[in-house]
């Protein structure tokens, strides 16, 4: 079977969970013997200025054939690449890119799958916006036009239009299994390790609430340290604003306890999860919760918001410690509790790792995607 993915920032270029998820999916499909091609829009700006780029760059990593598109002048290269891939199924991972998938469907006759990695309509509501954003409108169009809509959790499917319901399939995403097994799995003592956050420094990811919780955590655990990995992709100005807010919210002594390493490679992030005394996932909403899944597989103690897909893969008091989204005091108290009860936190991490290894690694979940593709082809 031949699969064409249309996405943004395909690895090794990583700008968040979508990049990692699509990279893992493509790798798992290739290992199942599928022919996988990817059109990756890397830092793409539809109205970008500057000198016209040259031809789009194509690459073959031995498993996946990829073309990288950075500007509108290269859209012809993307179309030609898509036609040359002769896909049996086209899988779109960003609603703004759905029109290209629909165009190729018309030309090639291949059905289109749309994955709802981000619930833009939910984010608009949580932000209190009175009118839908362009992303939310594109999301609605993709959900209406796709032959199959993939929701990574029941929560991600819950607010989709009723007209899409017959075409919605709930299937969890996967994460890469530890290799070698995490050191935490052998009961390694994580006392003194950092509190880790990984992802975008944005409002819906709970970054502001986490920053506001740091002084309260330090009041309970003065020697705690924090590593906030990630940033705001392709927006240096927005990232600079976040760093300024961080400096304003924390005293110099508190700021000295926080490290901002930027975006880390998958291996570097796995090492960080291995060392973490706690991983905090404070999102207002998640369609799945890849950072949580990756942390679980590394046996890291997790404090997370009780919302969306996170609530479907984490059990409060058993595999994680949950708080209500937006609750600064809840973040502080749950993280501090993990830091001050390391034995209990370690047991929680080990239970999470065992649960995740059975349910959340790509080799376990990829079969559901392959079967969904086959059903589309039979239809």
Image (tube, rainbow, N blue to C red):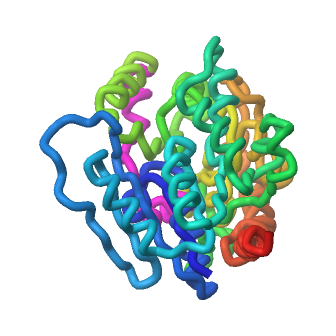
Q: Residue at x 69, y 35 (%)?
A: 285
Range covered by the magenta-colored residues: 250-273
- In the picture, measured across the screen, residue 280 lies left or right of residue 100, that is right
121 relative position to 201: left or right: right
Numbered-mark total: 0
Q: Is residue 114 visible?
A: yes
360 is within the stretch colored magenta: no
Q: Residue furthest front?
A: 107
Residue 20 or residue 32, whichever sits in front: 32
Where, by quadrant of the figure, is residue 190 drawn?
bottom right
**Is residue 332 visible from the viewing direction of this image?**
no
Question: Which residue sits at x=37%, y=60%?
Answer: 78
Q: What residue occupies the far left of the structure in this picture?
A: 51
Across and down, in percent, residue 121 comes to 67, 29
Residue at 44% x, 21% y: name it.
250
For the point 34% across and 46% down, which residue is it?
43
In which quadrant of the rendered image does the N terminus lie?
A: bottom right
Locate residue 232 relative to residue 364 in the image: left or right. left
Nearer the observer, 366 or 6:
6
Q: Does residue 370 sit above or below 136 in this rendering? A: below
- Where residue 331 appears, x then y in whole percent? 68, 31
Q: Residue furthest bottom?
A: 33
Residue 170: percent from the left, percent from the top?
80, 55
Instruction: Locate the C terminus and report the quarter of the image it occupies.
Output: bottom right
Q: Position of residue 254 (x, y in %)?
A: 44, 27
């Amino acid at each position: 079977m031949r699969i064409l993915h249309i996405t943004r920032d395909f690895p090794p270029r990583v700008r968040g969970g979508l990049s990692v998820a699509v990279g893992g999916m493509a790798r798992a499909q290739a290992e199942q013997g599928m022919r996988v091609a990817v059109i990756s829009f890397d830092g793409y700006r539809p109205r970008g200025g500057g000198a016209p780029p040259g031809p789009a760059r194509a690459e073959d990593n031995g498993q996946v054939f990829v073309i990288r598109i950075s500007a509108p002048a290269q859209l012809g290269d993307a179309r030609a690449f898509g036609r040359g891939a002769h896909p049996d199924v086209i899988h779109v991972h960003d609603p703004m890119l759905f029109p290209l998938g629909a165009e190729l469907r018309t030309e090639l006759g291949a059905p289109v799958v749309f994955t709802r990695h981000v619930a833009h309509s939910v984010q608009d509501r949580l932000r209190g916006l009175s009118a839908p954003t362009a992303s939310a409108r594109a999301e609605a169009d993709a959900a209406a036009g796709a032959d199959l809509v993939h929701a990574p959790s029941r929560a991600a499917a819950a607010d989709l239009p009723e007209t899409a319901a017959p075409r919605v399939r709930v299937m969890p995403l996967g994460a890469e299994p530890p290799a070698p097994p995490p050191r935490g799995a052998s009961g390694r003592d994580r006392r003194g390790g950092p509190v880790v956050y990984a992802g975008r420094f944005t409002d819906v990811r709970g970054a502001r609430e986490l920053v506001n919780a740091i002084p309260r955590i330090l009041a309970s655990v003065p020697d705690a340290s924090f590593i906030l990995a990630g940033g705001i992709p392709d927006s240096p100005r927005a990232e600079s604003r976040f760093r300024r807010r961080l400096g304003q919210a924390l005293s110099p002594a508190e700021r000295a306890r926080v490290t901002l390493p930027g975006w880390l490679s998958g291996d570097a992030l796995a090492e960080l999860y291995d060392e973490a005394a706690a991983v905090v996932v404070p999102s207002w909403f998640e369609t799945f919760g890849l950072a949580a899944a990756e942390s679980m597989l590394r046996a890291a103690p997790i404090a997370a918001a009780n919302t969306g897909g996170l609530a479907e893969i984490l059990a409060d008091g058993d595999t994680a410690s949950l708080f209500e989204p937006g609750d600064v005091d809840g973040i502080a108290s749950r993280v501090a509790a993990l830091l001050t009860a390391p034995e209990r936190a370690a047991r929680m991490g080990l239970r999470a790792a065992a649960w995740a290894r059975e349910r959340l690694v790509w080799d376990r979940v990829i079969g559901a995607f392959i079967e969904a593709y086959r059903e589309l082809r039979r239809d």
